[in-house]
Image (cartoon, helix red, strand yellow):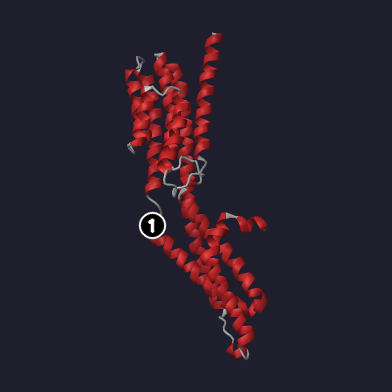
Amino acid sequence: MITTFGSSPFQRLLFPDLFLISLVAGGLSYYNELIAIDAASQVWLDSNGAAAGTTAIALLTGFRLNGSYGRYVEGRKLLGGVNTASRDLAANSLMWITSRNERERMLNLIKAFSVALTFHLNKKGGHYKLRRSDPHFDEQVYAEYHMEMKDVFRNERDTDFVRVCQWFRGNENVPLGITSLMRNIISRNRQDGIFNRELEGHVQTLVESLGGCERIQKTPIPSCFTRHTSRLLFVWSTLMPFAIYPACGPFFTLPSTIAISYSIMGIEDIGVQLEEPFNILPLRQYSDGVYDAIDFIASASSVDDDAG
């Protein structure tokens, strides 16, 4: 219970929504108990009519949550597709790219793609302690991006490292640019066409996943629907004390109103958070997972070569 009051959803709903609803419930209890001279002068609503409105509100809230959760699930699947395609591309590159330098370059680009995708989908790049209100916010984001890319390429003079940093500074689509570099490597690979087509297929999967993520990011649920749902929930919560007063009485109307309003409005708040999945999905964990997987695949391949 204590953690509930300190949680971010409760803090978001506390003011002004729950505060105003509490004022209405408290004022109603005060009037009916201390000012109204008899039962006929008390103010309340028929609970049967309120029950019908509650059913409609529940359906609307459920529809809102399902729509947002669908976006969350799709975003998670797309990131999972990036993870799988990155591993397959790394393993096949080690088998089929003939030039050793090009193989190492491809592995670095695969790692860089996951880092670039994180910063492309989330302005903070998963570094949630950064604050947009900070006047040096953009420089702080670039510093984090620069350090993560430096960890990938390990050489600040690397041509690809310089290129991806310049793209980021110029607000370009860095993940898409990296896939173009991957395709350049494949086009120069002196290998049978069937193997190059397989490599190209993995790169195409990365591009498709990138496009799917951008579609989710750039096409949110219509704001008119979100605003309409929030307004109806607020009106319903404001009228609810009048409906439950006959059953709860002056002492339990206020706490009951707060508890029920928080439960229903909390569901709507969850829907708002799920609507933007790349703000809550662990993007950096996905990126770190790709990085570790590529290193392990490369080390496993080198051990097998040494044994041969």
Q: In this view, does 50 lie above or below 228?
A: below
Residue occupying image coordinates x 49% and y 52%:
273
Which residue type carries mark 1?
Pro
Which part of the image, by quadrant, shows the C terminus?
Answer: top right
Which part of the image, by quadrant, shows the N terminus?
Answer: bottom right
Q: Residue 14's image quarter?
A: bottom right
Residue occupying image coordinates x 59% and y 86%:
42
Q: Where is residue 234 in the image (x, y as percent from the top left)?
A: 50, 68
Q: Can residue 243 be seen in this view?
A: no
Q: Position of residue 150 (x, y in %)?
A: 45, 27
Q: Where is residue 194 in the image (x, y as percent from the top left)?
A: 37, 20
Q: Can residue 267 be seen in this view?
A: yes
Q: Is residue 100 left or right of residue 256?
A: left
How packed mark 1 is, by other alpha carbons closer than 10 Å (few <14, some 14-19, many 20 or more), is few
Residue occupying image coordinates x 50% and y 25%:
294
Residue occupying image coordinates x 46% and y 31%:
147
Q: Position of residue 282 (x, y in %)?
A: 52, 41
Q: Residue 21's image quarter?
A: bottom right
Q: Nearer the viewer, residue 193 or 295?
A: 295
Total numbered labels: 1
Q: Which of 196 and 152 is in front in this view?
A: 152
SS state under label 1:
loop
Name the residue carrying label 1: 222
Q: In this view, does 290 lie above or below 131?
A: above
